[in-house]
Image: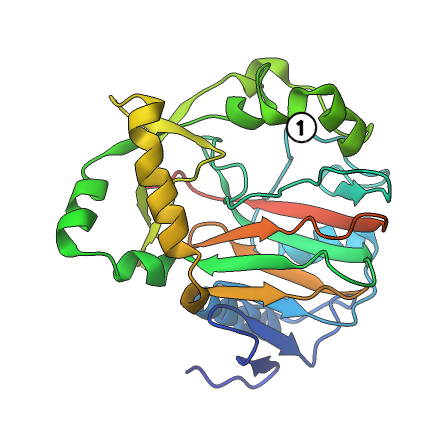
Amino acid sequence: MTQYKTIKVDRSVGPVGAVIGGVDLSEPLGDEVIDEIHTAWLEHHVVFFRDQILSAEAQAEFASRFGELDQYPFMTPVDGSDYVIPIIKEPDAEMNFGGDWHTDTSYKEHPPKATLLYALEVPPVGGDTLFADATSAYESLSPAFKETLESNTGVFSPKLVHGSGGGYKTEEAKKNLGSSYGGNAEFAESEVEHPLIRTHAETGRKSIYCSKPHTVCIKGWSRDESMPIFRYLTKHMTQDEYVTRFRWEKGSLAMWDNRCVFHNALNDYQGYRRHMHRVIVKGERPH
């Protein structure tokens, strides 16, 4: 394990991820601190910070230290920042945002490498996020199955969720997701091809990348033929040995690597409000 000089790294949070302490993200951070956070992030796939007080501008500024910021295509950003979007579930809403295993916007030609989610208001119980180590899960697959997966390509699209027939287009979903959600109808029907198994651009390690919500099918296969593969990989990857459950507190920030970790926002806090701010950092095209 890496030894750090400027930050404290607690690895006891679960099978994947680490809690970083000894840093105030609202303050200007030196290059050595950023380099150590980046190293911990690559090593643990997701890093968590507690007790932070961040404006939207400060969150975006911190995120920009890790690359070019990107805009989420289906949500209006908050006032004062083009890159920070609100993710709010009101007490009377039944549906939540991001409530299935996925990597963020993997249907883009250049999906985000990093997502930074900050908690402004959290329910007294529930509302945790699960994170799954897609690298370790891949590495435990049989050699023959790895070869089969790596020889195929996935067709990725936002249409399953955001398209005209997607899960977020029902009247109930529109009411639940709020006025900030919507738009980009043409992009919502688009498709792009990515590998089912991607190689991390910085570490060189391979990870499962396809998901039920964002991968329409394996190229040349029907969706019905593809779904057993997607279901199996999801079930395999989300076994307890690969999953960390993160309990949010007001002022918590999580930064995860979409190239090697999946996440799932639990919807178990009906009657309470949850308010988050999210920023994404542009990544490279998957290979």
Q: Nearer the viewer, residue 266 or 287?
A: 266
Q: How many labels does the image show?
A: 1
Position of residue 136 measured from the top left corner of the image (x, y, whole percent)? 34, 63
Q: Can residue 202 be seen in this view?
A: no
Q: Can residue 162 be seen in this view?
A: yes
The residue identified by callout 1 is 74
Quadrant location of the N terminus? bottom left
Quadrant location of the C terminus? top left
Q: Residue at x 74, y 65 (%)?
A: 252
Position of residue 46 measured from the top left corner of the image (x, y, whole percent)? 54, 63
Position of residue 244 measured from the top left corner of the image (x, y, whole percent)? 53, 66
Q: Residue at x 56, y 86 (%)?
A: 5
Q: In this view, does 164 lie to the left or right of 150?
A: right
Q: Residue at x 85, y 49 (%)?
A: 273
Q: Which amino acid does label 1 sit on?
A: Phe
Q: Is residue 74 left or right of residue 201?
A: right
- Tell which residue pokes out farthest to the left in this image: 144
Position of residue 45 measured from the top left corner of the image (x, y, whole percent)? 48, 63
